[in-house]
Image (tube, grey):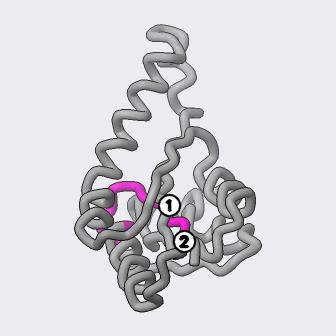
């Protein structure tokens, strides 16, 4: 089973990863794998790009992603589960669903909340968008 786990550094995202680790361990097949994906929307940084350049913004977002993935990678190493990671910029839900489809993942796992409840109320959550647009099973963990 190939599982794509969306990571944003939140506690629900780590809980989703732990669930995926337990699922892969229970299936006991060497073909099982987990891919971590970290996506940051760079639309809000357009003005910063004009002052510091696009490469500096990309480096900044990559550093944030690597920090968010550090704990997750440690958990996967400790569990001895085959894994890799993908870092992207763009619309978060779109990038997650596109990678899931292109990589032929069996399932997407993600936390239910990565932002504040007020932001979710106004903008809608990434989890909601992934659930409504993905063409494969999506596991949402609180």
Q: Which residue is mark 1?
A: 35
Q: Which residue is mark 2?
A: 3
Q: Residue at x 43, y 87 (%)?
A: 28
Q: Which image quadrant: the C terminus?
A: bottom left
Q: Residue 88, image x and y in percent?
A: 55, 42
Q: Secondary structure at mark 2?
A: strand
Q: CA distance from mark 2 to mark 1?
A: 6 Å
Q: Nearer the viewer, residue 73 or 91?
A: 73
Secondary structure, mark 1, is: strand
Residue that extends furthest to the front in the rendered view of this protein: 30
Residue 20 painted magenta: no
> x%, y% of residue 105?
65, 69
The residue sitting at 68% across, 59% down in the picture is 103
Which region is colored magenta?
3-13
Give the mark, 2 or 1, whose residue is nearer the N terminus: 2
Q: Quadrant of residue 137?
A: bottom right
27 horizontally vs 134: left or right: left
In the rendered view, tell whether residue 49 sits above or below residue 111: above
Q: Which one is in front, 83 or 45? A: 83
Residue 31 at what x, y percent from top left?
54, 75
- Report the residue that reaches farthest toward the top: 51
Left or right: residue 26 versus residue 93 is left
| Residue 1, horizontal then vertical, whole percent | 57, 78
**How many labels, in total?**
2
Q: Residue at x 28, y 51 (%)?
A: 70
Residue 97 higher or lower than 41, as above or below: below
Residues tagged 2 and 1 counted as in contact (Cβ below 8 A): yes
């Amino acid at each position: 089973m190939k599982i794509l786990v969306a990571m944003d550094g939140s506690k629900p995202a780590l809980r989703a990863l732990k669930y995926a680790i337990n699922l892969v361990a229970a299936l006991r097949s060497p073909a099982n794998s987990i891919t971590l994906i970290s996506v940051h929307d760079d639309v809000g940084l357009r003005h910063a790009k004009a002052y510091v350049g696009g490469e500096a913004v990309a480096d900044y977002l990559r550093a944030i992603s690597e920090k968010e993935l550090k704990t997750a990678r440690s958990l996967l190493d400790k569990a001895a589960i085959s894994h890799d990671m993908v870092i992207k910029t763009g619309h978060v839900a779109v990038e997650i669903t596109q990678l899931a489809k292109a990589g032929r993942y069996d399932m997407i796992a993600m936390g239910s909340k990565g932002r504040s409840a007020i932001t979710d109320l106004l903008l809608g959550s990434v989890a909601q968008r992934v659930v409504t647009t993905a063409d494969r099973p999506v596991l949402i963990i609180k």
